[in-house]
Amino acid sequence: MTSFYLLVSLLLFLVLALTLVVKLLARRSVAADFPFTSCETLCTPAERAFLGLLDLTVPDGYRVFAKVRLADLIKVSGELKASDRQAALNRIIRKHVDFVTCKAEDLAIAGVIELDDRSHDRPDRRRRDAFIDEAMGSAGIPILHLAARRSYEVAEVKRLLTDLLGIGTETGEDKGAYNLPGEQTVEPAVADYGECPNCGKPMVERIVKHGPHAGKKILACSAFPKCKTVLPYREPEDPELNEVINAPRFRMS
């Protein structure tokens, strides 16, 4: 009887061991077929900070997308023979651009924005940038290169974007006014809204585009993203403007 129980126990042990081996082999097979892990974030910290600046400065009626494949922006001409077409496709298939602006109504491509850090000084990056510029030019897509730095003048970035998108026209006035299609002349406010209580830069009028405060006017520091101070909106002639420093604050992500 004791031998019988030993035999049964041995058989059960072998079944369990075999089951474990099969599961381990199955896991290894899955790992071999799908050897992937999450990148955690889509953008680098510098790119994410710059995207926040673009959200503030891109004109209404446009949207910004990050990390877009070059092959999603341009395509190879169908007039080439198959071998030449594949060779041309190979030159763009593994490349991407930093940011793309599109018209919100139909997502038509309006322009490309490249954030150039120190890595773009390398010879291989310069060759890559030259190729991207020529490719965009041949496809009729405007491209803007901005050097990565710690702080930006919001008004200057907005002017560069309107020039890139072909919707801004400089008037020559001292205050840097510019026209948007179908709208009245807009003059970005600087000193009229007071200074940032944290860094002393001029506060400017902005409209929140995302989150629970979307659609509301605010006063944002013109040194964004270096300074992310945001205050409740006050009209320039409001006598309580000097007391805005004591008002409740909220920050934009």
Image: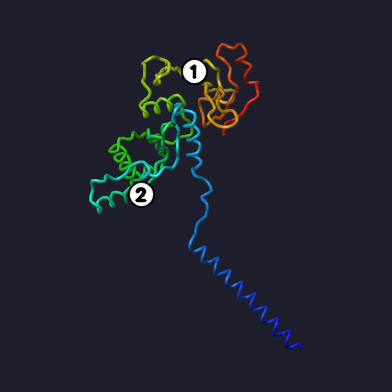
What residue lies at 50% left-to-right and 56% top-to-bottom?
Answer: 36
Residue 101 relative to residue 41: left or right = left
Q: Position of residue 225 (x, y in %)?
A: 51, 32
Amino acid on which the number 2 mark rests in the picture? Ile
Quadrant location of the N terminus in the rendered image: bottom right
Q: Residue furthest right?
A: 1
Residue 19 relative to residue 168: left or right = right
What residue lies at 40% left-to-right and 35% top-to-bottom?
Answer: 113
What residue lies at 48% left-to-right and 62% top-to-bottom?
Answer: 33
Q: Position of residue 162 (x, y in %)?
A: 39, 26
Q: Position of residue 44 (x, y in %)?
A: 49, 43
Q: Residues within 10 Å of mark 2 (few under 14, many from 20)?
A: few
* Quadrant of res 130: top left
Between circles 1 and 2, the one closer to the viewer is 2
Compared with 91, 173 (above or below) is above
Amino acid on which the number 1 mark rests in the picture? Ala
Q: Residues within 10 Å of mark 1 (few under 14, many from 20)?
A: some
Label 2: which residue?
93
Query: Which of 115/103 is in front?
Result: 103
Answer yes or no: do the residues labelled 1 and 2 have beta carbons within 8 Å? no
Label 1: which residue?
189
Q: CA distance from mark 1 to mark 2?
A: 43 Å
Element type at mark 2: loop
